[in-house]
Amino acid sequence: MKQTRQQKIIQLIEEFDIDTQEELVSRLTEAGFKVTQATISRDIKELNLTKISRGKGKQKYVVHKNDDERLREKYIRIFKDGLVSVDTAQNILVIKTASGMAMAVAAALDAMHFREIVGSIAGDDTIMAALRSSEDALEVKSKINDMIKASF
């Protein structure tokens, strides 16, 4: 029940500009949940919700993203902006980028800490990453492609 309620809270704050616990209680009640303000207060803390300004002195609840999530989004953005193609040559991952973007994409790749990658070298528009095995190269290629597709 708690997980279902918390999922509904996230859905509600994404759909509506909710700025008070009372409004959240009201919306949850309308959705068929029996809750108290104390329950909502605990949920807000557990979900790591925070308030942001929406202008004119008004605020709304949002899910607070931690630094790891922000960095991951940044790395994905770098990949999306710089990536041209990903291919494998046995245990080598060959990543083609836009001209001048290889170093940035390689830095993002390194920061993602893929356990399969032993190391990488970047030129102007190409990155060569050594992986532990051919299977690992295919797996990381698939992960990168999935990551890029999911970000669209």
Image: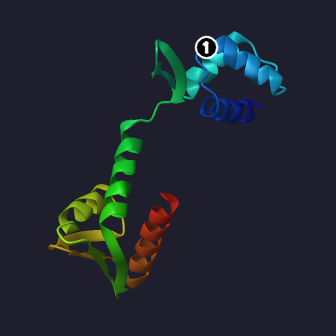
Q: Is residue 85 visible?
A: yes
* Quadrant containing the N terminus in the rendered view: top right
Location of residue 13 with respect to 38 vertically, above or below? below
How far across and how far down the image is residue 80, in percent? 37, 62
Quick check: 120 left or right of 113? Answer: left
In the picture as drawn, the residue positioned furthest to the bottom comes out as: 90
Residue at image x 21%, y 68%? 102
How far across and how far down the image is residue 58, in percent? 51, 15
Quick check: 63 left or right of 35? Answer: left
Location of residue 14 with respect to 46 vertically, above or below? below
Residue at image x 55%, y 21%? 45
Q: Quadrant of residue 122?
A: bottom left
Query: What number of labels is visible?
Result: 1
Residue at image x 58%, y 22%? 44
How far across and how far down the image is residue 126, in percent? 22, 76
In the picture as drawn, the residue positioned furthest to the right comes out as: 32
How far across and how far down the image is residue 60, in percent? 54, 21
Location of residue 125 with respect to 45 vertically, above or below? below
Tag 1's secondary structure? loop
Q: How is the image coloured?
A: rainbow
Nearest to the observer: residue 91 or residue 5:
5
Q: Which residue is mark 1?
A: 20
Type of the residue with mark 1: Thr
Nearest to the observer: residue 8 or residue 117:
8
Q: Quadrant of residue 42?
A: top right
Residue at image x 36%, y 77%? 86
Q: Quadrant of residue 128?
A: bottom left
Q: Is residue 130 visible?
A: no
